[in-house]
Amino acid sequence: MINPSDGIRNFLTVDVEDYFHVHVFSKVIKVGQWGQYDIRVEENTRKILDLLSAHDIKATFFILGWVAEKAPDLVKAIHRMGHEVASHGYWHKVIYGQTPSEFREDIKRSKSLLEDLIGEAILGYRAPTYSITRETLWALSIIREEGFRYDSSVFPIHHDNYGIPDAPRSPFLWDLKSCKPKAVAIKSSSEDCRETVRKKWSAFPADLLEFPISTVAIGSINLPIGGGGYFRFLPYGATRMGLAHINKKDRMPFVFYIHPWEVDPNQPVIGNISRMAKFRHYNNLLSCFSKLDRLMSDFQFGTIGNFLTRK
């Protein structure tokens, strides 16, 4: 099969959280109740690690601090296997449900824990439920002040829980004084994307580099194509076509995400949630792993950290 990525190395990212951490369950499962649920995240993450090894692919793992504390050997294994360890915060609370001081403490705690486990600086952060929105742009400066060099929390779509629909679709730098993207997003149509991004990243060390979740532009509308429930819902051929379009037509890498619970069709079913929430969470769990296997065969991948540091 001809590889549709046209030589571009994309970003496969894993949000390491368990099924009971998901935001849609937060009204029926409180933080203090987490200990009552069967922890399945380690087994499911190792299932993804085995698949990555079979394809000789390295990925970026945005690890929840709570998980890291419960399964430190998992974090060390991810690092030892050559994958990038990044932060997903500690408590999996959406940013718009925290005060600035609470948010700072959350990401500081997670970053410190992860760095102690792997003995290296953590460069990347991803907000739970992609909760960098127009209302939470104040969080950007805190993320940078706490030592993160890049963020991957912006989803340029309309959604009831997240999204900045008019955000750039390609990697860009945040101007932290105005909380706006730099005047021109980092494009790659006329030169190599990696070198362009690295030069901007090096030239503006005080700013925060953003890797938005990938979308396909249809006119003025961005359609989600970058993973999660959209990956489970769409036929694999549609996902493959959309991602190949980003590589071939937009000439830039795509950012794809998956959660360990999405490859676990046997996870417990949580009651007392809406039909829409139930559909979003449980739809097509049975086929997700095989689709992920095909994705790894069809595209080239690397970590965001290695992309930035020339490894």
Image (cartoon, grey):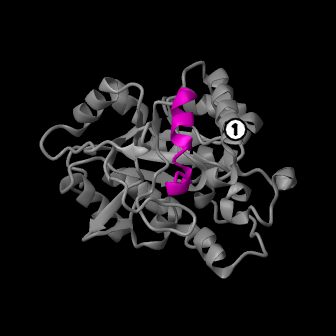
Q: What is the quadrant of the C terminus in the image?
A: top left
Q: Where are the magenta residues, as a range? A: 130-147
Left or right: 197 with respect to 248? right
Residue at 59% over, 60% down? 262
Residue at 74% over, 58% down? 20
Residue at 77% over, 50% down? 39
Question: Where does the image place residue 109, in percent across and percent down from the top left?
Answer: 70, 31
Q: What is the quadrant of the N terminus in the image?
A: bottom left
User: Is 5 in front, or is 174?
Assistant: 174
Left or right: 201 with respect to 131? left
Residue 143 colored in magenta in the image: yes
Dot 1 amino acid type: Ser
Residue at 86% over, 51% down? 32
In this rendering, the answer to whether 32 lies above or below 26 is above
- Decide if residue 143 is in sight here: yes
Question: Where does the image place residue 53, in percent across and percent down from the top left?
Answer: 47, 39
- Decide if residue 18 is in sight here: no
Q: How many residues crowd around disc 1 within 10 Å: few (fewer than 14), some, or many (20 or more)?
A: few
Question: Where does the image place residue 174, in percent across and percent down from the top left?
Answer: 39, 40
Left or right: 200 with respect to 276? left
Q: Residue furthest top?
A: 119
Q: Secondary structure at mark 1?
A: helix
Q: Residue furthest left?
A: 190
Question: Where does the image place residue 66, in percent across and percent down from the top left?
Answer: 73, 41
User: Is 38 in front, or is 35?
Assistant: 35
In this rendering, the answer to whether 69 lies above or below 18 is above
In this rendering, the answer to whether 123 lies above or below 26 is above
Q: Quadrant of residue 178?
A: top left
**Magenta: main secondary structure:** helix
Query: Which residue is under mark 1?
Result: 101
